[in-house]
Image (cartoon, rainbow, N blue to C red):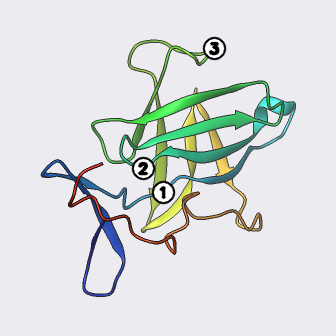
Amino acid sequence: IERNSKGEVLGLVFMDEMYLKDTITIAGIYQRHPVENDWHKVSITRESFVKEEYKWTTNNENDSWILRKGNNSNAFRLGPDCPYFEDGVEVILEIVNGNKIGLRFNGDLFIMDENSNYPSDGYNDDEPEIDLSEGF
């Protein structure tokens, strides 16, 4: 694990490659307004630190799919596990004046619920470091 001078995690070094920590996290609880069904209430959880993957789960927990970081730092690509999957369809993080506003998906804006007390990225940064210098 690579840290800056303040001790904050920057990324992970593995096999001489640096995997940077995503500086913008989208983990949280979101709602599309007006909420008309369970598909309009979602939670986003971090699934993979190295691959920068998140899981989009509707209020009906049987409906979920993976979002993968796109080429644009604010874009996340849908996989074929999403019922709305089309090549090139993305979820876009909307930022205004440096503040996260919500996620734009399929033409709708899902606004983050700031009162949800949701973990910022789903990973506990206080876990002990693992020394991989000797290999596995």
Residue indicated by mark 1: 25
Pointer 1 local density, CA inside 10 Å: few below 14, some 14–19, many at least 20: some
The quarter of the displayed image where residue 110 is located: top right
Residue at 63% of width from left, 45% of height from top? 44
Residue at 46% of width from left, 61% of height from top? 96
- Mark 3 lies on a secondary structure that is loop
- Mark 1 lies on a secondary structure that is loop
Pinpoint residue 113: horizontal percent, then vertical percent.
Answer: 72, 59
Q: In which quarter of the image is the N terminus?
A: bottom left
Q: Amino acid type of disc 3? A: Pro
Residue indicated by mark 2: 49
Q: Which of marks 3 and 2 is in front?
A: 2
Q: Amino acid type of disc 1? A: Thr
How far apart are the alpha carbons under marks 1 and 3? Answer: 24 Å
Judge left or right: residue 29 versus residue 50: right
Q: Nearer the viewer, residue 29 or 61?
A: 61
Residue 111: image tag:
none
Judge left or right: residue 25 versus residue 70: right
Pinpoint residue 130: horizontal percent, then vertical percent.
Answer: 37, 64
Residue indicated by mark 3: 83
Q: Which of 1 and 89 is in front in this view?
A: 1
Pinpoint residue 83: horizontal percent, then vertical percent.
Answer: 63, 14
Q: Which of marks 1 and 3 is nearer the N terminus?
A: 1
- Mark 2 lies on a secondary structure that is loop
Label pair 3/2, CB-CB below 8 angstroms: no
**60 up-or-down from 110: above or below:** above
Residue at 53% of width from left, 15% of height from top? 85
